[in-house]
Image (tube, rainbow, N blue to C red):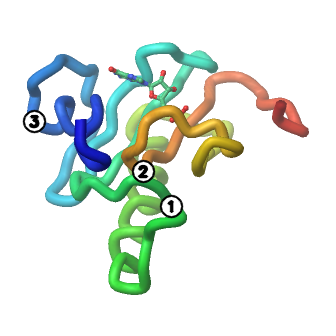
Amino acid sequence: MSETETIFSKIIRREIPADIVYEDDLALAFKDINPQAPVHIIVIPKQPLAKLADAESQDHALMGHLLLTVKRVAKLVELNNGYRVVINNGPDGGQTVNHLHLHILGGRPMLWPPG
Ligand code: 5GP
């Protein structure tokens, strides 16, 4: 796999199945295969950006779009009592898939501090 070719690229291309909850020209949202909360959704850019630290100023509109997509998806799945948004970046951030993604976690009260 190249640096930009991940399991998420295959989900974008529908080569492997995923429970997709939202899609537009720039972003895709699907249920996490190993949910850490009653609702756990992954939001990704279709553009294969490996991690947040790789985003450049030309990506600023995409970054804003991803945050607004989180808001839209959270409303769609009726997380009306709140939710947590997480971006794991790099090894110490706990990132395991090298395609930028935002976790939406909800359906229960979240704890703080995280592990
Ligand atoms: P990270 O640890 O990189 O922040 O998050 C990667 C997330 O992707 C994990 O929560 C993991 O469960 C999820 N994931 C990994 N492979 C797949 C897959 O094939 N399908 C789905 N739906 N989620 C996946």
**Alpha-carbon span between mark 1 and mark 2:** 6 Å
The numbered disc on residue 13 is 3
Q: Earlier in the sequence, mark 3 or mark 1?
A: 3
Q: Residue at x 16, y 19 (%)?
A: 16
Question: Relative to 103, is 49 above or below?
Answer: below
The numbered disc on residue 104 is none
What residue did someone put label 2 on? 100
**Left or right of 95, for residue 54:** left
Camera-nearest residue between 69 and 62: 62
Q: Position of residue 99 (x, y in %)?
A: 37, 46
For label 2, count other residues whose C-alpha is less than 10 Å away and answer few (under 14), some (14-19) or many (20+): many
User: Do residues under tags 3 and 2 come within 8 Å of each other at their CB atoms?
Assistant: no
Q: In terms of secondary structure, where does tag 2 sit? A: loop
Q: Residue furthest front?
A: 2
Camera-nearest residue between 113 and 96: 96
For label 1, count other residues whose C-alpha is less than 10 Å away and answer few (under 14), some (14-19) or many (20+): some
Residue type at mark 3: give it: Arg
Q: Earlier in the sequence, mark 3 or mark 2?
A: 3
Q: Earlier in the sequence, mark 1 or mark 2?
A: 1
Q: In terms of secondary structure, where does tag 3 sit? A: loop
Q: Position of residue 25 (x, y in %)?
A: 15, 58
Question: Relative to 89, is 63 above or below?
Answer: below
Give residue 29's quadrant in the image. top left
What residue did someone put label 1 on? 52
